Image (spheres, coloured by chain):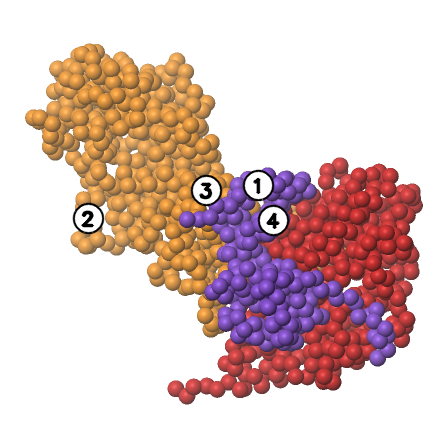
Amino acid sequence: MTDDWKTYKPLLLPDLPGLTDIETYEKYEGYHALKTVLDNPDTWSPEEVVLQVKDANIRGRGGAGFNAGLKWSFMPPPDGKPRYLACNGDESEPGTFKDRKIFEFNPHLFIEGAIIAAYAIRAEQIYVYIRGEYRAWVRILQKAVDQAYQKGYLGKNILGADFNADMTLHMGAGAYICGEESSLMESLEGKRGYPRVKPPFPAQRGLWGRPTTINNIETLANVPLVIRNGSEWYRRIGAETHPGPILYGISGHINKPGVYEYPSGMSVHTLIHEVAGGIRKGKKLKALIPGGSSTPPLRADVLDGLTMDSDSLRKAGSMMGTAGMVILDEDTDMVDVVWRISHFYHHESCGQCTPCREGTGWLEKTLRKIRNGDGEMRDLDLLLAICNRMEGRTICALADAAAWPVRYSIERFRDEFEAKCKQTVYALS
Amino acid sequence: MPEIFIDYQRFEFEQPGKVLQFMLDAGLDLPFFCYHPCLSIPANCRQCVVKAGMPVLNREKGTFELDDKGERIIRYFPKLMTACSLDLTDGMVIHTHHSDPLVKQAQADNLEFILINHPLDCPICDQAGECPLQILTYKYGPEGSRFEHKKVHKPKAFRLGPRVVLDAERCINCTRCVRFTDEISKSHQLTIVSRGDKNYPLTAHGQEFDDPYSLNTVDICPVGALTSADFRFKARVWEMNQTPGIDITNGKGCNTYLWTRDNLVLRITPRQNDHVNSHWMPDSGRLAYQRFNENRVHRPHIKLDGNDQVRTSWNNAILTLREQLEKTEASEILAIGSPHAPVEDNYAFRKFFKMHGVSEFFFVPDIRPGSGDGFLLSDDQTPNTNGVRLLDFKETTCKNLSSKIQGDKYKLIVLLDDSLFDRPDWPAIDPGNSYFTVWATNHTPTTAAAHLVIPVTCAAEHAASYVNVDGRIQRTVAAKETRYTNRRLNLEMSMGRLDHYGTQFDNWVDEKNRIDCIPAWEFFKKLDAEARFDWNSSREVLNEISRTLPVFEGVSYERMDTLLGVPLSISRNTPVDQKKTIEPKP
Amino acid sequence: MAESFSFDGKDLEVIRKILSRYPHKEAAILPVLWYAQDKFGHTSPDVQHLVARTLDVPEAHIHGVVSFYTQFYEKPMGRHVLDVCTCLSCQVCGGYDMLSYIEDKLGIRAGETTPDGQFSLQSVECLGACGYAPMLQVTNKQYVNHLTPEKIDRLIDDLKAGIEPSFESMPPKQHEKDNRLS
């Protein structure tokens, strides 16, 4: 990565005030992508939209990094019965706070992307699932949706074309697990947010048993960019295997925390030291959690040359996740941090599968014991053993997400854990 | 035919299905908790994990890729799969704990997880002995636990409803109970509340779990979380005998197990019969055990002077009744059969009095329209209405019958086991001046009015057949001994540990639990002074019935046992065409 | 005696509108519970009963749903609920210090309500404001970012005076001029 980023003009969150207003948005090419598609159904058939988006390789921004267009292509051919698009704005992974920026500063970009996606997968109902805590942002987005209805971008015969789409905002009520796509569907259906057994996958049996595609908010916000400028243009932005603009959420011990939009593949050092103003109080960096709490933490000494894209992060032993980077300085007590992450997963485990329901609590209790100064060396091996027994043994990935930070923290910061355990004072009787 | 390889063994399958069910059907072992063949598959217990793979297909050639040794190349799923939710697929390869150490480890790991917050209170838990968690832990579980923290605490001994008690700490969140109320009984009374390791099943606030099928959740609970309020702490399951039976409180004839200890029936649970009740039965039928134990008629009772009955000998009872028969014209005998009594007893009753010249036989069905639910509760409150109909008893009503009794026409009333005076539509009358003889299992207002009461065996004490509302004939097996039966001699009766190793001198043995009664058919055999009946068992009575009555043709205890009941060619709840039945020949 | 709760004609009109957005009535459960909680301040058993009856869905199901989601209050809470985030970014930026400060100030522990029923305090999981840590949310509504003891003092005084915090926009720092060079 060169210094290009300094001249980078944000695409998702451009420096244009008042984009929440539909007229302002329209002034800056807003809804042009949708018009292009609907006005030229011969060039822009739904299949063509899927193809373009697939070719652009928009990797899912919710954490899994799956090609969005490829996901769309899994939808079966229409059979005249309802099909759904669900937009995932549950955004609950600790360290992640990016989608709310889109709601607040560029909601129409997302709405436009969602309508194009609905067109591509031939769905007429769009549900936007937003975490209940984001009530203020639901209001902002609802206003934008209302405007879109007024302007005829939503509703019946959109822009005169033979295409209808309705968008409904649906508020969660405080459950991290509802960000998991099948759990999100259960929650939307008014149930406890228990992830579903896959297969069948949502494209086969989703909401109310009908084919459904679930995309992250940021992912959908990228769609109009692809339609406006073409997939080739999009693929040239940022890292080759993980292209496009990324909303980097930077938090923790950092001088200028916040959400920054830059191309993927940004150097981690650039992001920390230049973009976000360096470590707070001039301290040294100890660790980086690159993409939300579930991504394995990286030691500061492996960050040289590391870039924020899935390939580079995988090689370093972590993941892109949601690009919610948590910066931890030299004074951080890793045991304490990992305990708190474990506490989070313990609290958020839905309780459906045995290994996760029981394992998350066991991890937390053991980590709390070490943190409280009662740890023993064997507890570290026990923690690793519990992680082994949780990973890959459950319906959804929450158990993995809970195990990884523990496993990799112990592997990478074992000295700290051992030091904590060695401090334990034993009673002599 | 499509094939599947389980632990290197080849199996063929015809129907699509799931791997776990296929393995269970094939008699292979795999541990599981949440799966139930009648319920949806949540795959939440994660106990039935297997390693699964598919052969790699060469799409161009349409054949499977082979390795150097000519074996199919298998591509395994990256994670262990739950067999309960895994579709049978042609060519699939499955490794269980028998052939894969990782699977074996995963099963033990999962049990360790399940047990960390489980109270491990088996010594005081009612489920112990029949607890899948206990059994599977012994077989597949880890040696011990490494969990050293405080367990999660939840409500204990919580009364979920009138019949079900919850110990939430024992719950492993398999959700079988919730799925039962959602999918089978459809009362939707249960849900899982809270989240994560605080989860447990509960009703809505302030609502009782009074589903008429609530006790089925106790049966399917794979741990001791749901127990029966009635049966709690009554007996350890390994002390009891388990004997197949039929629910006699209802016309549906749910198949049951009677659980006895020292000749008391302590509980009744459903026995699987997919033709009748699947795995379920209504709660009401489970309470029938009380009438098998309590308030029984013990030895014949006779009224000498005034209204008080006294116990008398069998010999005296027989002589008294013979005397009554001698001095009564056949036309003066009112013979009433019973939809509560089995086919054999009604047949013997009818045959005996027919030989005495009685030509008309009545019975009063107890059908209460609207009381059924279209599932396992029928409007018919009796187990054998169709059986009595098929034996050519005339249906009548309480009103008609009571007016017959009050009139002067009949001098002798003989009533097979039916407490007519308890029926809601029975007019309050006394039996007039006629001599009133009743065969009965329990003391009732009807027996209290009788001059002579002959104690007969109940459904828990005899092997006998009942025809349910759908025309299916099914039979019971003797579960508790009478004064005249003996488990050691009657090989059909079950022998529990206490029967094998105990003696009659053990302090837990109570002779009073063995009732002084005999089957009705046996009484009529004894009653016949000319000894014209040669039956030695109810089996032989039924054989005679099937020989002589075409509608029962081909019916035998053996067939009922192998086929779980035999459907007779009659349609549900319709009166049987009287012409089809042939008069029983002496 | 339990309070009785009911929906009036206007409420039923809103609920009818909610129902029209979904193919199955069960999907309206979460929105209607939200609506009920806004109206009554909680989703206690009586409110659950009302929602179950209004939507004609099993009450046990409502109970299961309410107890699954942490934002629904099964028990009535204080007039203002302070949800202090203590998760990850907020933890390392002093979330627990802020929580203790409020605990001391209000004289209650997390999970409790002040005797006068004014404030409930909770330590909660990530609220998605990691860049503005430490922070809290007031009664499922506005976020209060970059907490300091002074800010907390002001907030509590305001709330006592009946002034709810207003929406605090956090525009991307990227657009600030001085961020271009570092």
Q: Is A368 placed above or below B480 here?
A: below
Q: CA distance from mark 2 to mark 4?
A: 64 Å
Q: Are marks 2 and 3 on the same chain?
A: yes
Residue at screen point 38% across, 26% down: B368
The spot of residue A298 in percent (x, y) is: 71, 76
Please check whether the numbered discs 2 and 1 fall on a single chain: no
Measure the alpha-carbon separation of dots 1 and 3.
46 Å
Colour in which chain A is drawn: red
Q: Is residue B144 visible?
A: no
Disc 1 crowd, CA 10 A, few/some/many (<14, 14-19, 20+)? few
Image quarter in which the N terminus of chain B is found: top right
Asked if the residue at tag 1 contacts the one at tag 2, i.e. Cβ–Cβ closer than 8 Å, the answer is: no
Which residue matches tag 3?
Answer: B279
Question: Image quadrant of residue B420?
Answer: top left
**Chain in purple?**
C
Name the subunit of mark 4: C
| Residue kind at label 1, given as amino acid type | Asp
Instruction: Read off the chain for label 3.
Output: B
Dot 2 or dot 3, earlier in sequence: 3
Disc 4 secondary structure class = helix
Residue A166 numbered tag: none
Which amino acid is tagged 3?
A: His
* Cβ atoms under marks 2 and 4 closer than 8 Å: no
Dot 3 crowding, Cα within 10 Å, few <14, some 14–19, many 20+: some
Cα distance between the residues tagged 1 and 4: 12 Å
- Name which residue type carries label 2: Asp
> Where residue B69 sits: x, y (%)?
72, 61
* Pointer 1 and pointer 4 on the same chain: yes
**Mark toward the viewer: 1 or 4:** 1
Identify the colour of chain B in the image: orange
